[in-house]
Amino acid sequence: MTEHIHWRDIEDLAGNWNGLGVDVKRPASGKPNLRLLSGNNRRMQLVLGDQTLLWGSMSRCLYGVWLVRNHLLEQLPQTLVGPIDSPQVEQQVRLDPALRLKAWSRFFAQQLMQHQPEFFYPGYWLVRALRPESPKPMRPLLSGTEAWYFKGGEDALSHMPQWAIHGRNILDNQQPGAARWVELGESGGAVVGLHAVDPHSGRLKWWRKKAREGSLPPILLWYVSGLSCHLILDGHYRLQAAIDENRPPEFLVLSSPRLFSYRPNPQEQQKVLGALQMQIQRKNLETVRFNQLLISTFDDRPYHGFGSQSWAGIASEKVWVDQVSGLLNERGDTGELENILTREAPDEFA
C-alpha cells in the first residue's frame, strides 16, 4: 500500500522547512477506522471502530459548532501511533533543531500508515508545524495555558493554512467537561483529546522530565474542519506534561486541505514590475521589501484551503439526539442542551 503514497518536503520562499506534503493515489478501499460521520441537520459523530468518541453539531447561523465528548477512555481501543521510547527521543534530540520537526513528521506519517493504513484516504495531505510564539504585549498578565499561543509560518512565504492555537482552547483531558461551543475560525478551534490522562501515571512523570529538559516530542493533531477542532492523535501525556511544567510544546497538524491553483495575469505582473523599478530608482524602496514584492507578484504556487472528509453513517437524527441527551442528562450538564438540539449558538453569543 505504501507504494501508492508519496511525500515531499515543502519549503517556504526563505528555504525553511514548512511542512510535509503527502500524496495518496491508491484507490479507496474502505472507510477508515477513525472517521467523522455525518447525518441530517448537520449532526456529526467521531468514531474509532464501533466506539463513539464525541458528537458535534453545526449551529444554524454557521458561526460555530457544539462539541460533546463521550466518557473519556483510559486508552483508545485501537493503536494510532506506537509508544515513543527513550532511544527515539534521544535520536531526535541529537538532530539540528531545524531538522527535528521534519524528522518527527515522517515518523508520525509512517506510524499511521503502519497502524491505521486506511486513515490516509485518497487525496492530498499536509503535515504542518505550529510553534509557540513569544508572548505579545497583551498577554503578560495571563498565566499558564491562558498565555500560550501557537502559530505557523508567514502566509506570504508559504501559502499554507494560517492556523493558530490559543492555549485557552486546549480542553482538559482528565475530565470530559461540559458541552463546548467552538466558534468557526476561532484560531483553528479547540484542541480535543480522544482519551483520558491519568495524573498519577509513571509515563506522565517521565514526559514531565523530558519537558523540563526541552526534549519533548511534538504533539500530533488532526484538523477536522467540520468540527472546527484539532484532535489529538498522539501526545495526550506529552501535552499534559507540558501543561504541568508550563512549557509550551510544539504541534504537528495533519490535515487534508484542498489545493487552489491560479494563473497570475502577465499584464498586471508587468505593471507591478514597472512600478517597483521606479521605486528602486527613486530609492524609495528597500531591497528586502523589493524582493518580497517581486516574489509575491510572480508566485504561482497553489493555495491550501480548509477541508476534511466525512462519511454518511449516523443512523438518524433521533438516534443522535437520544445519545447526546442521554449523556448530558446522566452528567447533569443540561444547561446548553436545548441550544445543542435546536442548533442555536449560546445565549451570550446570540
Image: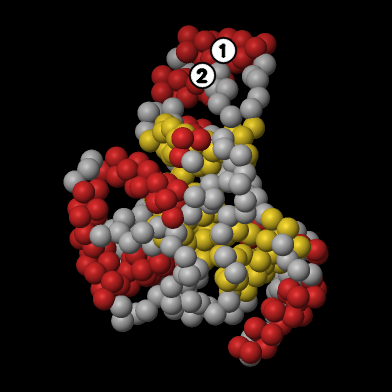
Question: Residue 262: image x %, image y %?
Answer: 65, 24
Asked whether residue 164 appears in the rendered view, the answer is: no
Question: Residue 91: image x %, image y %?
Answer: 21, 49
For disc 1, the marked residue is 273
Q: Residue at x 37, y 28 (%)?
A: 15
Residue 45, above or below 225: below
For disc 2, the marked residue is 294
What's the coloring here? secondary structure
When asked about the image quadrant of residue 333, the answer is: bottom right
Residue type at tag 1: Leu
When asked about the image quadrant of residue 297, the answer is: top right
Q: Secondary structure at mark 1?
A: helix
Q: Return the residue nearer the eye: 65 or 248.
A: 65
Alpha carbon of mark 2 to alpha carbon of mark 1: how far? 7 Å
Q: Return the residue nearer the eye: 81 or 275.
A: 81
Q: Residue at x 62, y 51 (%)?
A: 30
Q: Secondary structure at mark 2?
A: helix
Q: Is residue 248 left or right of residue 59?
A: left
Indicate the quadrant containing the C terminus: top left, top right, bottom left or bottom right: bottom right
Q: Residues within 10 Å of mark 1 (few under 14, many from 20)?
A: some
Question: Residue 143: image x %, image y %?
Answer: 39, 70
Residue type at tag 2: Leu
Asked whether residue 231 appears in the rendered view, the answer is: yes
CB atoms at circles 2 and 1 under 8 Å apart?
Answer: yes
Q: Residue at x 38, y 35 (%)?
A: 17
Q: Residues within 10 Å of mark 2 (few under 14, many from 20)?
A: some
| Disc nearer the start of the sequence (2/1) | 1
Q: Return the residue nearer the eye: 86 or 307.
A: 86
Residue 273, above or below 126: above
Q: Residue at x 46, y 44 (%)?
A: 127
